[in-house]
Amino acid sequence: MTHDNAPQEALIQVMVLMSAVDNAMTDAELARIGRLVRSLPIFEDFADDLILHIAQECAALVSAPEGLDVALEVIRERLPKRLADTAYALAVEIAAADHRIRNEEIRLLELLRDRLGLDKLTCAAIERAAIARFRKV
């Protein structure tokens, strides 16, 4: 990771981890990552052509021994505490992109919550907001 973009790269890694946790990165999840990077203020000055490179770095981290734990620690180190809830919100956004939350995704959300030191009420509010956004008629 580069120093200047470390927080944005960590946020992208969170989204990539969430997308890949069930061993099936769906087109909906990948498209959502791209849309979020292009539209959210946190990524305003970020070159979205780096997404693929960051995704590949994340995949390499996860494929190593203790990979998920190492990836979560790298994310925690690179992410300022004030962006912990943003990271969790992005993870929930990707998990909800295909309108189903799998057990693996729930477990990763729990690990992310614990690693980033988020309280359960904050996480519940973020999750409830996602339910409202993704609700169908």
Image (cartoon, rainbow, N blue to C red):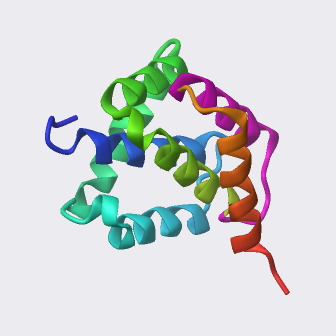
Number of dots carrying numbers: 0
Choose top left, top right, bottom left or bottom right for residue 7.
top left
Q: Is residue 48 left or right of residue 123?
A: left
Q: In the rendered view, tell whether residue 26 sits above or below residue 78.
A: below
Q: Quadrant of the N terminus?
A: top left
* Residue in view at x 56 percent, y 44 percent: 88
Q: Tell me: 17 left or right of 130.
A: left
Range of magenta residues: 97-116
**In the figure, is residue 131 to the left or right of 43?**
right
State the image coordinates of residue 134 (x, y, percent, origin top left): 72, 72
Q: Is residue 5 above or below residue 61?
A: below
Above or below residue 7? Residue 63 is above
Q: Is residue 1 visible?
A: yes
Between residues 93 and 28, which one lies in front from this camera angle?
Answer: 93
Give the quadrant of residue 117. Answer: top right
Looking at the magenta stretch, what is its main secondary structure? Answer: helix
Identity of the residue furthest to the right in this view = 137
Which residue is painted at 30% across and 48% down in the image?
A: 8
Q: Residue 24 or 45: which is nearer the viewer?
A: 45
- Residue sticking out furthest to the top: 65
What x and y, as percent, mark residue 21?
63, 39
Q: What is the x, y in percent for residue 41?
A: 32, 66
Q: Is residue 113 magenta?
A: yes
Relative to 58, is 88 above or below? Answer: below
Q: Residue 67, image x and y in percent?
A: 50, 20
Q: Identify the residue at the far bottom of this view.
A: 137
| Residue displayed at 65% across by 32% down | 119
Identity of the residue drawn at 48% across and 26% down: 72
| Magenta span includes 71 | no
